Image: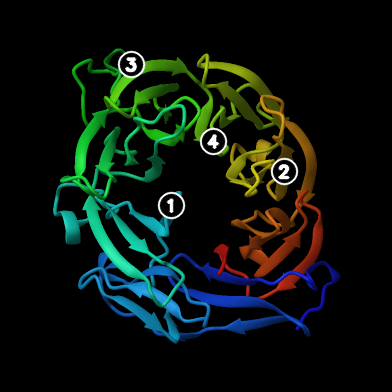
Amino acid sequence: MVNSKAQQTVDYTIAYFSSDRTYGRIVTVTNTADGIVIDKLACTAASNTPKDEKPLLIGLTKAQQAVTLDPVSKQINILDAFPEDAFPAHIYSEPNSNRAWFMYDGDSETGNDRLNCGENGSSVTIVENVNSSDARFIKTICVGRGHHQAHFTYASANHPNVPLLALISNLTDGTISVIDNEPSSAKYLQVIKTINLCEPEKEDDPKTTVPNNAFPHGLVYSAHSGKIYNLNNGYGSVAVIDPVTLEIEARINFKGHSNLFVPADGRYVLGRGADRKSNPQHVIAKLSVLDVTTNEIVNTMNIDDVYISKYFFNPEATRLYLTTSSSGNDAQKENLKADALLVFDISHLPEIRLINETRTGFSAGTLDFVQVDDETQLVFCSIAAEGKILMLDNDGNIEESIKVDEPNAHSRLWCI
């Protein structure tokens, strides 16, 4: 049990998942009147089933039971013991909803989800009430091949005609699968269009269509402009897509970036990247601000000796948190800050101001946030290499380090 002044008045329970990328386990960290209590869930041994038939990790109930999905039967299981080979898919939460979308990239040979889609692509699976005994399987939908990102469109006061859509980018195919997400539609939860991102003039074979070398990785929707923005890494461009017509209406030069992310209001889109070529001794991270009203980059910050890994916004969208990792040649890696957590003030975009650089000892995994009265009070950060959770304030200052498990290769955490 751990006591901390920082958390005495804030209620929370954190689920901490760690794995060696084959076998995993879950630990919970709960605040009590007597301090922090750490519980390890019992585990059941791995099965001999193929990867695409292994249980999908969905969440954890407040009673600290594991929620899994059997990918064959589609049955939701509420378990007292966690299956150590459960598959922790990438998860995207749908805004204004209690549903989550789980990404499956397919097998390593073909990129196909052979169980659900045969030879015709990989899949996404939709589940509602994920951290609850009321979890319910909705549907598995076949999309394109390759690593996926997801984003969702919705109507706003300035753009009332924008339909409810789920957009899934397909890295290997160079496409976006568009899914109708309007419950009253006759095509609800069906793929209604596949957007081909190919730019023939940038291909070796100008007739290439799908698959192509767009390599989409960075997909966002701006409620401010009512447009979709997709980063094509292979071309160094952003495709601007109209969600009403589902046509690409513009392309923006955006070289040197590898992902996009957007604060809630959508006034600006942020891009991250890395320069590993101009200086053989140093990696230079890039953080850029794209104005969606002009489709122009209006601010860029370069950060020496940093390779950006993951990004997180606090719920108020006043802070941007960037984790770092290792990339580059041997000399560049020697100089890298691979254990930095960078915290930026983004309350006055397009200005971006670095307000803190916290060294976490090893690369951070994921972050989650606890609010009180709509204000972030605590930030939690997982550190797999030390089997610990860091408790921080809203500006990224470490208030407590909580040892929760043995070191491992991968970790994530979330509030339940």
- N-terminal label among 2 and 1: 1
The answer to which quarter of the image holds residue 263 is top right
Q: Which residue is mark 1?
A: 92
Q: Quadrant of the C terminus?
A: bottom right
Q: Earlier in the sequence, mark 3 or mark 2?
A: 3
Question: Residue 286's spot in the image, x, y percent?
Answer: 63, 28
Amino acid carrying label 2: it is Leu
- How far separated are the C-alphas under marks 1 and 3? 31 Å
| Measured Cα–Cα span from mark 3 to mark 2 | 35 Å
Q: Position of residue 390 (x, y in %)?
A: 72, 63
Is the residue under label 2 in contact with that under label 4 (CB below 8 Å)? no
Instruction: Please say if 105 is above or below 55.
Output: above
Residue 241's place in the image compared with 193, above or below, is above
- Does residue 1 lie above or below 54 as drawn? below
Quarter residue 152 falls in: top left
Q: Picture coordinates of residue 140 (x, y %)?
A: 24, 58
- Mark 2, residue position: 342
Q: For mark 2, does the 10 Å Cα neighbourhood hold few (<14), some (14 to 19), or many (20 or more) residues?
A: many
